[in-house]
Amino acid sequence: MSAYKVTFNCGALTLEGSLARPQKPAPWAAVLLCHPHPLYGGNMDNNVIQAVSEKLVSQGLAALRFNFRGVGGSEGSFDDGKGEEMDAHAALTFLRNYEGIEANKIGILGYSFGGLVALTAGVKNDLVQAVGGISPIMRPGILQNCLKPVLLAYGTKDDVIDPKKIISESEGSPGQALVETIAGADHFFWGYEKEVAEKMAAFFVRQLCPGQVAG
């Protein structure tokens, strides 16, 4: 796996990221990864986000982790999800234009607060072909217009996000929203990173690389 520090613009702001590329020759499908809440220590080096990135790359997909505005070396300040959604759209455009990335094989995934951003941006952005959320914050109706494949996952011991909201919103989607449970995991997934990463990577392989068998 090769990872490269990258920067891209969102309006007047410069954001930082890390693009991990598989060993196989280009072109690659790619997934954008959105980290947890910046005001509670969330950043692109989060344990769950890193685990998913590593698993995706092992399956032959590229993975872009990045810091939302105001986090780490990214300029700006927290914007309660609105600016962060703009950041995600900018990151998707960066991926589309990056040499070696297949523009018609891009997905997005987010964890917790990043899940809210990923679902919101993923439903709207035509570049996105598949959407994933790990213990995502679920706003009412967030998937009501989504016809894209969606996979949501949560831990059975999550005491931060109500699983009932995840299930309810998935059932309200007119598309292909699936839900996976991680038995024994709480909201932070310590010790369960491998399991959730495998489920998410397998989903993106199925959606973005049809015919490839996830390992």
Image (cartoon, rainbow, N blue to C red):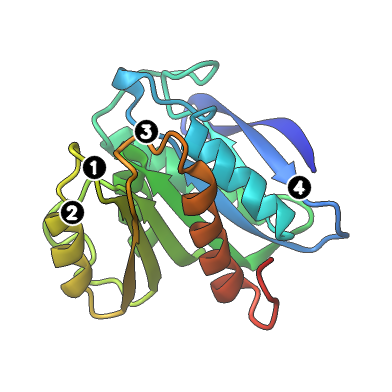
* Nearer the camera: disc 1 or disc 4: 1
| Residue 39 % position (x, y) | 30, 19
Q: Earlier in the sequence, mark 3 or mark 2?
A: 3
**Callout 2–callout 1 Cβ contact below 8 Å:** yes
| Residue 121 % position (x, y) | 36, 53
Category of crowding for the residue at label 2, using alpha-carbon neighbours closer than 10 angstroms: few (below 14), some (14–19), many (at least 20) = many
Taking the image as shown, residue 16 lies to the left or right of residue 122, namely right
* Nearer the camera: disc 3 or disc 2: 2
Taking the image as shown, residue 124 lies to the left or right of residue 60, namely left
Mark pair 1, 4: CA separation:
32 Å
Q: Earlier in the sequence, mark 4 or mark 2?
A: 4
**Callout 3–callout 2 Cβ contact below 8 Å:** no
| Residue 21 % position (x, y) | 76, 47
Identify the mark at residue 73; answer none if there is no mark. none
Give me the residue at 51% from left, 67% from top: 203
Mark pair 4, 3: CA separation:
22 Å
Q: Amino acid at mark 4?
A: Arg
Mark 2 sits on what residue? 163
Q: Amino acid at mark 2?
A: Pro
**Callout 4–callout 3 Cβ contact below 8 Å:** no
**Callout 1–callout 4 Cβ contact below 8 Å:** no
Category of crowding for the residue at label 3, using alpha-carbon neighbours closer than 10 angstroms: few (below 14), some (14–19), many (at least 20) = many
In the rendered image, the residue lying farthest to the bottom is 211
Identify the mark at residue 158; answer none if there is no mark. 1
Mark 3 sits on what residue? 36
- Is the N terminus in the top left, top right, bottom left or bottom right quadrant? top right
Secondary structure of the residue carrying numbered label 4 = strand
Question: Is 147 located above or below residue 74 in the figure?
Answer: below
